Image: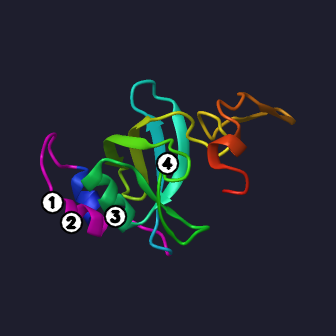
Amino acid sequence: MSEHFKALERAPCDSRHPLAEILDAARFNADGLLPAIAQQHDSGEVLMMAWMNREALEETLRTGRVCYWSRSRGKLWRKGESSGQQQHLRAAALDCDGDTLLLQVDQTGPACHSGRRSCFYVALEGDEARITTEPLIDPDTLYGKGKE
């Protein structure tokens, strides 16, 4: 844990700290990324986990439209640019170690490339895995055949 985040443990409620200092102290991994968990702001439903670099995080905070870093494409990925299923930021928070983000979002339609509302639809139960939801939209319709 960085000394900066250690000091924040004793910071009084509603104290303010410069964003640049907090992001400088955040614990991005060796690839310059932080895991970002997207949660529907009003229901608490966990929608997905993706990665953000500092540029994606700063763009998200600046524009209010969630932007991630696509490891497979090697570039910024603005959620919904292919599918139209956007995420609009309602709130963002770093965890106590400064190494994980929680994004409270307003998700338009499915968050998952499978066409499901949430990426977390494979329940692990005993010695089986069970699919818990149906797609809201067929992935071929959502992205067009051959995309993603």
Three-letter amino acid code at disc 3?
A: Ala
| Disc with the residue nearer the chain's start (4 vs 2) | 2
* Tag 2–tag 1 contact (CB < 8 Å): yes
Q: Which mark is residue 80?
A: 4
Three-letter amino acid code at the position of disc 1: Pro
Residue 40, magenta (yes or no): no
Q: Earlier in the sequence, mark 1 or mark 4?
A: 1
- Let me know if residue 44 appears in the view: yes
x and y, in percent, of residue 131 in the image: 77, 32
Label 3 neighbour load within 10 Å: few <14, some 14-19, many 20+:
many
29 is within the stretch colored magenta:
yes
Residue 78 vertical position relative to residue 133 in the rendered view, above or below: below
Quarter of the image for residue 134 reads top right
- The residue segment tinted magenta is 10-30
Residue 13 as seen in the image, left or right of residue 127: left
Residue hosting label 3 = 26
Say what secondary structure mark 1 lies in.
loop
Residue drawn 73% across the image and 28% down it? 132
Q: Quadrant of the N terminus?
A: bottom left
